[in-house]
Image: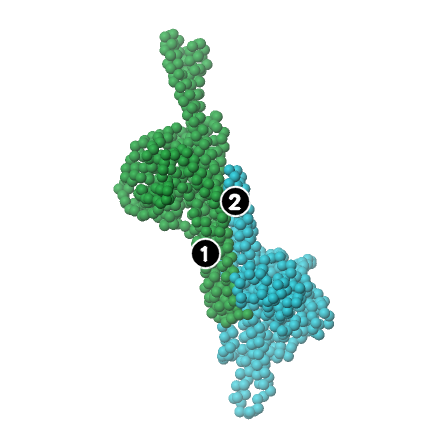
Chain colours: A green, B cyan
């Protein structure tokens, strides 16, 4: 399989990984910090042994988003968002970071990078991009790509994408990736010059392969099945979550209506007045608290979405295996048939159908010289075929070995990340419950104080 | 609100009045744990922010309370202070034990009314009778008739929309029972109404129907008097204080109506939210079946969401059963009070008209004829009774709403605590095996 040749000057050490996880631990739950540190160092540690001639650590961030207008390919004016990518190198000794590169990229360039990686690293589960269009929206969120909340979440998603690549032991060494971070102009041309589009497997071929592979590696079949199920269940989860968010929003907002009527009621009361006024005020605070709650939940949804899209990447690797296996089987079949033909020609028995055979029957026997010639051609083809089969076999086995290694790496990553996502979701819920319970308690106490005893 | 027989009463918390140490008593009682006058930690500190204003004269937790200190139990202690007030109670009434009766002609529910009293008006110290809704209705109209100058508490609504509410469902019967219990307790608390003959008969008679049939006229002097007030006179101006009451009641009923509508809307939204939650939780279970290491954590989250859903359902039920009925009861109360105000107007109108008539007639001055005097007397009694009742009503209303609003806040707090517990319990589950790789 093709890999970018290691270029000592251009290689990067994996960046400290913080994919979509919140770095602030101010939510009152102590996640085991030892384990966290061990994990961070672990991923770096592995590649340390790989590339121990690197001296510097790299930090990547997508720090800003900016609305731009320009002219597109059809010379029509368009509005798009550009993202600022900043790369810093961190001195080992004092931990200070220095800005080394800074450039602007738009979403389509990220897509180009990913498509390139998909072609050149078919055995790798390539990290997914954040969604192109807002999906799984609930009523408050707009489906508009220009919406500031969407842009902000996309910025985080793109940063996460780059960090994932940078922390991948193989992908981080890719030259095109390096150039993506460092070479603003001409990058697109450079990518296209690799001719990767030509190498891409045709979609049709990939689809057909599913139905006719006789002996796929069972692990890959199971994995494909798993990725399909995972996609389905996470989609379902995100859809229902969006509906839940919608309904919850409704509940809180209706509480907002209490504020005014309690205030009006308090106006006609003597002793109860202050208590009712305070009740109305607390209802307003309660109603407005939903916005922060749901914003935090969007973050959780984004973490799930990443793995929804990862499932697609996983399936792509399985499909590649099937395609290779299919190619192999076809080649083997072809070879077997040619061998058969050869044998029949040599012995004179006709078992396999061939056009030449038919015409021979109809129009008379061929000459021994003609037969010899045909046998020779076939023998050449058989030879070639055997060579090809051997190399395809080797390729196939290499692919399976390398792909499975990355899949194992991916599985560990997935389990870690999703567990953390669930923990932070639980922590979020706990924080919300405490806040709202506290709000009611404050109201209760203030009401009791106000209502003269 | 008042105490009752030694059995547990729903509205006064886990212990009856008699079992609780009197708030004004010293700390000699066994139950006063931590005998000084600072409140026991679990009762107050766990919930309040150590607010000194809320210190009770008597510390200690009611023995055997299993639930954590809540603001409503706090509330009940405070209410004790309001109730006792120096006077001792000599009449206790409880409505409980609903039973369904199936007869050929109809099916209906009866409730047990238990009365305990040391009053001379009662031959026996204790009574237990069974009554149905129409008996309560009879009592109420008799009270209105015989005590027209007083504010008679409302009954829960007589009619239910068929098909919408099942009038034999446990929730409906329980809601009604609570309202009927409240109704009788309000009468019991009233210094005049509690001595009414009809009330006595209602509480004691073995067969109420005999009395109903006999149609015994047990009108009081006032009742008799007001009964004969002709409605033909129109009042020119309502005195300021009664006009103020009328205006207050109008706005009050209006605001409660709005709150009722908002509350209903909230319940509706909460139910729809619940429907989605009930679909949301199980998806985590489905996912869990696909996974290996993540299976337990995902299953844990699924169970957690399930628990939160159940807690929400309980909260919504509480709102429907405890919050809404009280709002509606006070709206009905305001309506009946406005009728009493109108009656008062009539009495005043008659008096003023008669007085004017006398003033126009040249004779009989300065002596005021007897019947005009009677009218004046009637009016002044009415005004006095009504003013006293209004004050009593305002006090009770304050208490009732304090209990209602604090009760709802408390229920909300309990809901959040249940959710909190559910999520906190799965954190260790989610965190485990992080190191073991």
In the rendered image, which quarter contains the N terminus of chain B? Answer: bottom right
User: Image quadrant of residue A128?
Assistant: top left
User: Image quadrant of residue A78?
Assistant: top left
- Name the residue beneath numbered marker 2: B430
Q: Residue furthest front?
A: A93
Q: Residue furthest top?
A: A368
Which secondary structure lies at badge 2?
helix
The reply to whether residue B345 is in sight is: yes
Residue B341 spot, x, y in % from top left: 54, 75
In the displayed structure image, the side of residue B160 where residue A317 appears, left or right: left
Image vertical order of residue B289 relative to residue A292, above or below: above
Picture residue at 43% right of the left edge, 49% below the top: A24
In the displayed structure image, the side of residue A74 where residue B279 appears, left or right: right
The mark closer to the camera, 2 or 1, is 2
Count of marks placed on residues: 2
Residue A353 spot, x, y in % from top left: 43, 16
Picture residue at 50% right of the left edge, 75% below the top: B244
- Name the residue beneath numbered marker 1: A289
Residue B130 spot, x, y in % from top left: 69, 64
Q: Residue furthest right?
A: B124
Query: Quick one: B14 or A253, which is closer to the camera?
Result: B14
Picture residue at 35% right of the left edge, 35% below the top: A11
Residue B401 spot, x, y in % from top left: 54, 66
How far apart are labels 2 and 1 at the CA level? 27 Å
Picture residue at 43% right of the left edge, 27% below the top: A398
The reply to whether residue A246 is in sight is: no
Query: Quick one: A276 or B176, which is closer to the camera?
Result: A276
Letter of the chain that mark 1 sits on in the rendering: A
Image vertical order of residue A133 relative to residue A287, above or below: above
Which secondary structure lies at badge 1?
loop
């Amino acid at each position: 399989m093709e890999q970018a040749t290691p270029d000592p000057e251009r290689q990067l050490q994996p960046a400290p990984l913080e994919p979509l996880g919140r770095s602030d631990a101010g939510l009152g739950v102590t996640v085991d910090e030892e384990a966290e540190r061990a994990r961070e160092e672990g991923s770096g540690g592995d590649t340390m042994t790989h590339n121990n001639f690197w001296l510097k650590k790299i930090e990547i961030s997508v720090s800003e988003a900016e609305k731009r207008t320009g002219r597109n390919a059809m010379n029509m004016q368009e509005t798009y968002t550009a993202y600022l990518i900043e790369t810093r190198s961190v001195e080992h000794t004092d931990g200070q970071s220095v800005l080394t590169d800074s450039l602007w990229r738009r979403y389509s360039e990220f897509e180009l990078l990913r498509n390139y990686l998909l072609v050149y690293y078919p055995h790798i589960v390539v990290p997914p991009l954040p969604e192109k269009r807002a999906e799984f929206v609930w009523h408050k969120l707009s489906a508009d790509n220009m919406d500031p909340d969407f842009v902000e979440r996309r910025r985080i998603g793109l940063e996460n994408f780059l960090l994932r690549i940078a922390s991948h032991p193989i992908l981080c060494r890719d030259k095109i990736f390096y150039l993506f971070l460092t070479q603003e102009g001409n990058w697109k041309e450079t990518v296209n010059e690799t001719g990767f589009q030509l190498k891409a497997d045709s979609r049709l071929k990939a689809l057909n392969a599913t139905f006719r592979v006789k002996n796929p590696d069972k692990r890959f079949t199971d994995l494909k099945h798993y990725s399909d199920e995972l996609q389905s269940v996470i989609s379902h989860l995100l859809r229902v979550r969006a509906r839940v968010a919608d309904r919850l929003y409704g509940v809180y907002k209706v509480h907002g209506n209490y504020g005014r009527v309690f205030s009006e009621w308090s106006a006609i009361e003597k002793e109860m007045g202050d208590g009712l006024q305070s009740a109305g005020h607390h209802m307003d605070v309660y109603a407005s608290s939903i916005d922060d709650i749901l914003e935090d939940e969007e973050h959780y949804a984004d973490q799930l979405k990443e793995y929804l899209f990862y499932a697609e990447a996983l399936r792509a690797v399985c499909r590649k295996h099937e395609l290779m296996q299919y190619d192999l089987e076809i080649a083997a079949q072809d070879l077997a048939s040619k061998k058969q033909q050869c044998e029949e020609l040599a012995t004179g028995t006709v078992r396999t159908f061939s056009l030449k055979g038919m015409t021979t029957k109809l129009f008379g026997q061929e000459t021994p010289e003609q037969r010899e010639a045909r046998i020779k051609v076939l023998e050449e083809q058989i030879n070639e075929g055997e060579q090809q089969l051997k190399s395809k076999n080797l390729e196939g086995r290499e692919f399976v070995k390398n792909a499975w290694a990355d899949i194992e790496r991916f599985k560990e990553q997935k389990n870690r990340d999703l567990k953390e996502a669930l923990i932070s979701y639980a922590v979020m819920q706990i924080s919300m419950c405490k806040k709202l319970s506290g709000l009611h308690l404050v109201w209760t106490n203030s009401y009791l104080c106000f209502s003269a005893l | 609100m008042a105490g009752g027989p030694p059995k547990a009463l729903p509205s006064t918390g886990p212990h009856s009045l008699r079992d609780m140490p009197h708030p004004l008593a010293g700390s000699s009682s066994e139950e006063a744990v931590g005998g000084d006058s600072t409140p026991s930690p679990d009762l107050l500190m766990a919930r309040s922010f150590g607010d000194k204003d809320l210190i009770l004269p008597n510390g200690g937790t009611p023995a055997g309370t299993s639930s954590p200190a809540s603001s409503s139990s706090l509330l009940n202690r405070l209410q004790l202070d309001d109730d006792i007030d120096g006077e001792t109670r000599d009449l206790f009434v409880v409505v409980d034990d609903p039973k369904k009766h199936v007869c050929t002609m109809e099916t209906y529910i009866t409730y047990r009314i238990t009365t305990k009293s040391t009053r001379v008006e009662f031959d026996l110290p204790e009574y237990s009778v069974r009554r149905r809704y129409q008996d309560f209705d009879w009592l109420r109209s008799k009270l209105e008739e015989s005590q027209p100058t007083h504010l008679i508490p409302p009954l829960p609504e007589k009619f239910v929309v068929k098909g919408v509410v099942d009038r034999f469902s446990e929730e409906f019967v329980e809601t009604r029972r609570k309202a009927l219990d409240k109704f009788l307790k309000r009468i019991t608390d009233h210094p005049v109404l509690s001595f009414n003959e009809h009330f006595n008969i209602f509480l004691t008679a073995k067969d109420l129907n005999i009395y109903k049939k006999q149609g015994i006229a047990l009108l009081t002097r006032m009742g008799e008097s007001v009964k004969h007030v002709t409605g033909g006179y129109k009042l020119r101006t309502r005195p300021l204080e009664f006009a103020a009451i009328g205006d207050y009641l109008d706005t009050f009923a209006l605001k409660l109506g709005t709150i009722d509508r908002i509350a209903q809307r909230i319940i509706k939204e909460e139910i729809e939210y619940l429907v989605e939650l009930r679909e949301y939780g199980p998806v985590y279970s489905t996912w869990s079946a696909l996974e290996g290491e993540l299976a337990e954590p995902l299953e844990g989250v699924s169970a957690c969401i399930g628990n939160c859903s159940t807690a929400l359902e309980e909260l919504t039920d509480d709102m429907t059963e405890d919050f809404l009925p009280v709002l509606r009861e006070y709206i009905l109360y305001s309506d009946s009070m406005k009728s009493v105000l109108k009656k008062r107007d009539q009495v005043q109108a008659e008096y003023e008209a008669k007085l004017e008539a006398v003033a126009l007639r040249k004779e009989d001055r300065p002596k005021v004829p007897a019947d005009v005097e009677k009218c004046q007397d009637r009016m002044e009694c009415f005004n006095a009774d009504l003013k006293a009742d209004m004050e009593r009503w305002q006090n009770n209303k304050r208490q009732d709403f304090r209990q209602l609003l604090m009760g709802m806040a408390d229920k909300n707090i309990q809901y959040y605590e249940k959710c909190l517990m559910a999520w906190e319990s799965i954190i260790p589950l989610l965190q485990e095996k992080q190191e073991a790789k």
